[in-house]
Each structure stands twice: as C-alpha cells, then as structure tokens.
Image: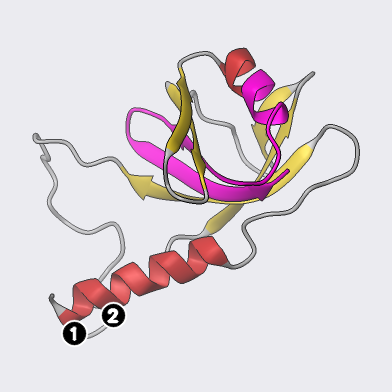
Amino acid sequence: MNSSFRKMLIAVCVTLTFGCFSFAGGRTLTFQVAGKPVLTGTQTNPQPEYPEKDEYGERKPTRPLACTIDPDSGISFIGQETPDFILYEIYDSGNMCVGAYGDEAAFIDALFSLTGEYRICLSTVYVTYSGYVVL
C-alpha cells in the first residue's frame, strides 16, 4: 500500500475517532461529522481538494463540523448552512448497516429508537458527512 495513502487513511480515521460523539441532555443529539467527497466515474477535476504538503503527498485531514439532530427541528450544522441530504445511513459498531433512509423524519425516528454506539452517514450529491454517536 502506498505510504502517502496509508498516512491519509490514518489521519481520516483519527479525525473520525476523536471528538466525534457526545450526547446532549433531552432528546437533542450533538456530535461532529467530517465530510468526504463522493467519488463518481465522471470526475472532471482530478485535482485534490487540499494542496500537497510536501513531496510525499500528505494532505490535511478533513475538518470536523458540529452537527445536531433534534426530533422537532431536524438536522442542522452549527455555524454554517446545513446541506440538502439525499441519504441518511446508520451503521453499528461492527460496520453493519442498521438502516438507510431517504426521509429525514424516518431516519431521526429510527436513530432515537436505538441504544449503543453508531456511525451516522449523511450524504449529499457531492459529499458524505460521517460521525459517531453514543445513544
């Protein structure tokens, strides 16, 4: 495996592992997500999102974003505009898909009916935001 790819993969894993989950009181869930561009077969701009750091090809890790999920007000990003999501996914700690939803309300109902540690993936046409929650 390419050394620079391995370093980038480790950086993404560390970013997603640390500081990505917390539970706020009541029924509002606050956690951090990190965005990753969606790869399609028709990439028109092969340039990386971040400039190369040095000759080894290291790039900056994704910036975590604070996100809240509330049964009454839905999903919102703190400090920036919330994108339009097309797919909402829940994965358990074994990376098995618990549910995939096209509707925000169904996703929120399913999420708040669970207990344990889960990975949440919120997908737009261009970016998938991923973070961890403990319910």
Residue 117 at x, y percent in the picture: 63, 49
Amino acid type, mark 1: Tyr
In this rendering, the answer to whether 41 lies above or below 132 is above
Mark 2 and mark 1 in contact? Answer it, CB < 8 Å: yes
Which residue does the image show at 27% across and 69% down from the upper left?
51
Instruction: Identify the secondary structure beneath mark 2.
Output: loop
The quadrant holding residue 69 is top right
Residue 56 at x, y percent in the picture: 18, 84
The quadrant holding residue 18 is bottom right
Left or right: where 132 falls relative to 95: right
Question: In this picture, which residue range is highlighted in magenta?
Answer: 108-135
Left or right: where 79 falls relative to 53: right
Q: How crowded is mark 1: few (under 14 residues within 10 Å), some or many (20 or more)?
A: few
Which residue does the image show at 52% across and 43% down from the upper left?
92
Which residue does the numbered mark 2 point to in the structure image? Answer: 53
Name the mark on residue 48. Answer: none
